[in-house]
């Protein structure tokens, strides 16, 4: 529980008991020892002092500490360290782009960049939390967005992100510590490489994020490759056309109505189902995630 502060300007300073971080940033060591510094530094987003936690991220990881306050992280549902989405493990720019494309623009939380508007939004969120209301932002509101995010999700821990930083002395050929050096002995990236110019605010607001741009580019290349393979097999390039089958209900005059759940239970054994669209009481369109699953269901 936050203590009562005498100074009015300090009333909004944040005090927390545990950080909001992802599994990757915690590291591979199940026993984590953290240091806690109340009001240790200002948040890189809202400039409000907050509680700073620091720990060694795993047996071979470097010392990591939170970069933004818990309130800002909770407003975007991201990790306080890496600024990645906590549910899908994706950059904010990728997640918000998919939500907007799939008709979930209301789920994209636009955090104000001005101090006054951001303070008002923070007060509103804190009041909702005190009243037991959950923050509903950054959550897909339809199955299409949820499926697309799930297909791109990176929830397995990526502990290579916790490796020590590069040794500047090794790059100049002057490091004499050898294997005892706590930093990595690798040559640095090209100074013009966009990955070497990452910014916390850009990652948080989902703008000019080189990691997100790379993921979107690779996803487009995979989609184009799949379309080219379908065209080479004689299709029209639409993967959904060969991944969807139509199931006709034989007992149309029956009093019993077949539900979507029953259709899913019938066909889930053939492969992962992307969507089921009911055609009144006459039939249903079942879309699988791969053409092979569709062919298997037809053959059976």
Image (cartoon, helix red, strand yellow):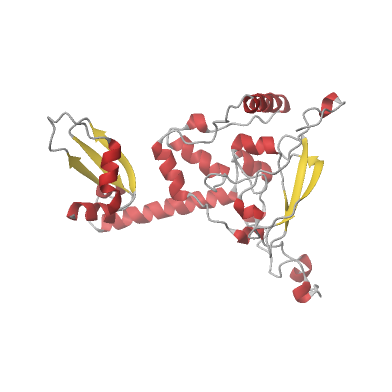
Q: Depth check: 41 or 170 in front?
A: 41
Q: Can you say which quadrant of the picture contains the N terminus?
A: top right
Q: Residue 166: x percent and y percent?
A: 72, 64
Q: Residue 224 versus residue 277: which sits nearer the camera? A: 277
Residue at x 41% of width, y 55% of height: 222
In the visual, does 194 lie left or right of 277? right
Picture quarter containing residue 57?
Answer: bottom right
- Left/right placement of residue 169 relative to residue 60 reads right
Point out residue 212 in the picture as x, y percentages from the top left corner: 55, 48
Residue 291 is situated, as x and y percent measured from the top left of the image, at: 28, 53
Left or right of 281? Residue 58 is right
Residue at 65% across / 53% down in the picture?
25
Residue 216 can be seen in this image: yes
Q: Is residue 277 left or right of residue 60?
A: left
Q: Quadrant of residue 27?
A: bottom right
Q: Identify which residue is drawn at 26% across, 41% down.
A: 263
Q: Is residue 125 above or below residue 83?
A: above
């Amino acid at each position: 529980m936050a203590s009562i502060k005498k100074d009015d300007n300090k009333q909004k300073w944040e005090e927390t008991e545990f950080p909001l971080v992802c599994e990757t940033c915690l590291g591979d060591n199940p026993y984590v020892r953290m240091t806690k510094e109340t009001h240790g530094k200002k948040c890189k987003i809202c400039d409000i002092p907050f509680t700073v936690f620091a720990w060694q991220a795993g047996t071979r990881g470097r010392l990591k500490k939170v970069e933004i306050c818990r309130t800002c992280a909770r407003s975007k549902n991201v990790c306080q360290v890496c600024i990645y989405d906590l549910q899908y493990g994706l950059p904010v720019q990728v997640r918000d782009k998919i939500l907007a494309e799939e008709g979930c623009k209301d789920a994209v939380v636009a955090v104000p960049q001005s101090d006054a508007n951001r303070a008002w939004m923070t007060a509103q969120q804190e009041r909702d939390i005190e009243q037991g209301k959950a923050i509903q932002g950054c959550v897909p509101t339809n199955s299409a967005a949820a499926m697309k995010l799930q297909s791109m999700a990176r929830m397995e821990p990526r502990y290579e992100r916790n490796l020590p930083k590069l040794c500047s002395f090794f790059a100049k050929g002057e490091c004499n510590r050898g294997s005892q050096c706590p930093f990595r002995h690798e040559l640095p990236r090209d100074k013009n490489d966009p990955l070497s110019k990452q910014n916390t605010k850009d990652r948080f607001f989902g703008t000019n994020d080189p990691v997100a741009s790379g993921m979107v580019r690779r996803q487009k290349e995979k989609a184009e490759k799949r379309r080219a393979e379908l065209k080479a097999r004689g299709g029209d390039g639409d993967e959904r056309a060969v991944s969807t089958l139509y199931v006709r209900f034989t007992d149309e005059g029956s009093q019993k109505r077949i539900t979507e759940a029953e259709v899913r239970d019938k066909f889930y054994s053939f492969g992962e189902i992307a969507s089921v669209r009911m055609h009144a009481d006459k039939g249903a369109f079942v879309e699988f995630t791969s053409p092979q699953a569709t062919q298997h269901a037809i053959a059976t």
